[in-house]
Image (tube, rainbow, N blue to C red):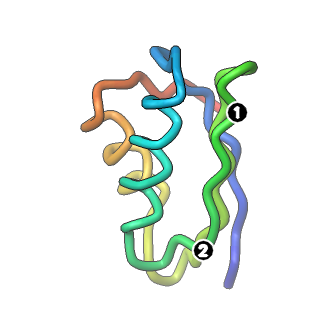
């Protein structure tokens, strides 16, 4: 089952931030699509909730040095 979530991410400031998040989240098994919106500080993720939990996605972003807020 494909699900979609928009996460508020603090600490993104440049193109490197965008690539870092896109690459790390895309590498997670079960993630279908990642779109980082630097201008409004959000990350849209399409994922298969039967394969990956939202907690794994948020912890992957946090492991890159960013803070994930509530939806």
Q: Work out whether residue 14 or residue 11 is closer to the camera in this orientation and state it.
A: 14
User: Which residue is pictured at 70% across the width and 69% down the height?
Assistant: 3
Up-down relation of residue 10 to residue 18 (above or below) = above
Q: Work out whether residue 51 or residue 66 is closer to the camera in this orientation and state it.
A: 66
Residue pointed to by mark 1: 37
Kind of element beneath mark 2 = strand
> Is the Cβ of the residue at disc 1 closer than 8 Å to that at disc 2?
no
Judge left or right: residue 63 versus residue 9: left
Which quarter of the image is occupied by the C terminus? top right
Up-down relation of residue 10 to residue 56 (above or below) = above
Quarter of the image where one finds residue 29 = bottom left
Judge left or right: residue 4 versus residue 49: right
Kind of element beneath mark 1 = strand
Q: Sequence-wise, which precedes: disc 1 or disc 2?
A: 2
Q: Position of residue 34 (x, y in %)?
A: 61, 56
User: Which residue is pictured at 41% across the width and 22% down the height?
Assistant: 67
Residue pointed to by mark 2: 32
Up-down relation of residue 2 to residue 10 (above or below) = below
Q: Position of residue 6 (x, y in %)?
A: 70, 43
Which quarter of the image is occupied by the N terminus? bottom right
User: Which residue is pictured at 37% across the width and 67% down the height?
Assistant: 27
Circle 2 packing at 10 Å, graded few (<14), some (14-19), many (20+), is some
Q: CA distance from mark 1 to mark 2?
A: 17 Å
Q: Position of residue 61 (x, y in %)?
A: 38, 40
User: Which residue is pictured at 42% across the width and 44% down the height?
Assistant: 58
Q: Which mark is residue 27?
A: none
Q: Position of residue 22 (x, y in %)?
A: 50, 50
The count of marks equals 2
Please identify the residue farthest to the left as the structure is shown: 63
Judge left or right: residue 14 versus residue 56: right
Circle 1 packing at 10 Å, graded few (<14), some (14-19), many (20+), is some
């Amino acid at each position: 089952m494909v699900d979609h979530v928009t996460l508020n991410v603090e600490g993104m400031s440049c193109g490197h931030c965008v690539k870092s998040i896109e690459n790390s989240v895309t590498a997670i098994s079960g993630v279908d699509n990642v779109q980082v919106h630097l201008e409004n500080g959000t990350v849209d993720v399409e994922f298969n909730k039967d394969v990956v939990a939202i907690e794994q996605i948020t912890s992957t972003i946090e492991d890159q040095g960013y803070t994930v807020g509530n939806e």
